[in-house]
Amino acid sequence: MTPDMSVELGPLALKTPVMVSSGTFGYGEEHAEIFDLAELGALVVKSLTLSPREGNAPPRIAEVPAGMLNSIGLQNVGVDAFIKEKLPGLSQLGVPVIASVAGTTMEEYEEVCRRLAKTGGLAGVEVNVSCPNVRHGGMEFGTNPTATEEVTARCRRIVKGALIVKLTPNVTDIASVAMAAESGGADAVSLVNTFLGAAIDTVKRRPKLSTVFGGLSGPAIRPLAVRCVWQVAGAVRIPIIGMGGIMTGEDAVEFMLAGATAVAVGTASFLEPTAALRVTEGMREYLVRNSIASVRELTGAARG
């Protein structure tokens, strides 16, 4: 039996449910030299802002037990350079490309979306309202349901393709924020982004990150992320992209059983650039082993 691995995220059809998450895969061009990106479900590039950003001062990455802390601070080339220098090559690789959009004001989110809407080659836009590593904007919008609904609605009026909203777990009630994104017109939500954390160097007696706080990712957060997916799946009708510490095919299956339609591999790509392909194959083997004809049968199957 060859299982059907295809899924749908609103208007977006994917050949497999395994994507690579924003901020962990660069702009994809680096990895195109290692493997065929067309084997991925989709590629989500680094978050783009209106102007180029240098990001936070180093040190901005710290390894911790079962994961890593990062405080990159949305370093990126800016939306115009992405459109001119990156997108033309990416659009020829046979993989759906999703642009991640970030900003410090509602108007910046709108303008980045507006510039992206004028170009071809994109399958959709992910609105990042969940970055914990910038002083203004980002997570400020994602912790307030009203602001989440407004920024989603503003981007929805501009974006013609798939519109995904990336949620932060650093809230009291993530389901209410997901519902706000749905009300604003999102086709899907992706969750979760990193958990806010900190680490201290006991030799130097100083924080390991220049910003003190950073985003925790990796296997350490997986049970928390699965909990968030379960909660959101019970609150919205739109598809969910689950992420947070996925290292194996069975990790991905766990997210789908909790209610996700697709998954995204993040930190694992730092350890192994082809991790997403290994996760995909692991999911396929799980389906064969359990005589499941389609990966879509997994979504929410643990919910009863």
Image: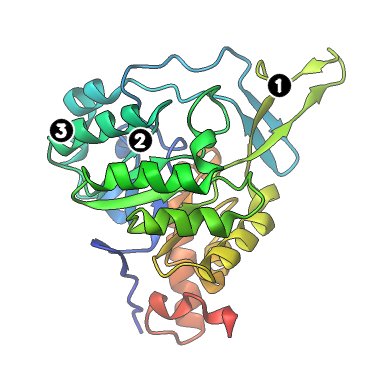
Is there any visible trace of residue 142 in the rendered image?
yes
> Does residue 40 appear anywhere in the picture?
no
- Could you give the CA–CA distance between mark 1 and mark 2, rounded to whole angstroms? 25 Å
Q: Which amino acid, by three-letter code, is at mark 2?
A: Val
Question: Image point 56% across, 70% down: which residue?
Answer: 258
Q: Nearer the viewer, residue 107 or 31?
A: 107
Q: Earlier in the sequence, mark 2 or mark 3?
A: 3
Amino acid on which the number 1 mark rests in the picture: Val
Horizontal side of 54 relative to 57 (left or right) equals left
> At 87% across and 16% down in the image, what residue appears?
203
For label 1, the residue is: 212
Reading the image, the residue beneath label 2 is: 101
Task: Classify 154 as above or below 112.
Answer: below
* Label 3 sits on residue: 88
Drawn side of residue 272 relative to residue 159, left or right: right
Residue 114's x, y, as percent?
20, 34
Crowding around mark 3 (Cα neighbors within 10 Å: few <14, some 14 to 19, many 20+) is: some
Please give left or right for residue 182 compared with residue 63 in the image.
left
Q: From the image, which quarter does the C terminus lie in?
A: bottom right
**Earlier along the polypeptide chain: callout 1 or callout 2?**
2
Q: Is residue 241 above or below residue 68?
A: below
Q: Nearer the viewer, residue 38 or 126?
A: 126
Q: Of callouts 1 and 3, which one flags the residue occurring earlier in the amino acid sequence? A: 3
* Residue at far front of view: 146
Residue 124 location in percent, x, y? 26, 48
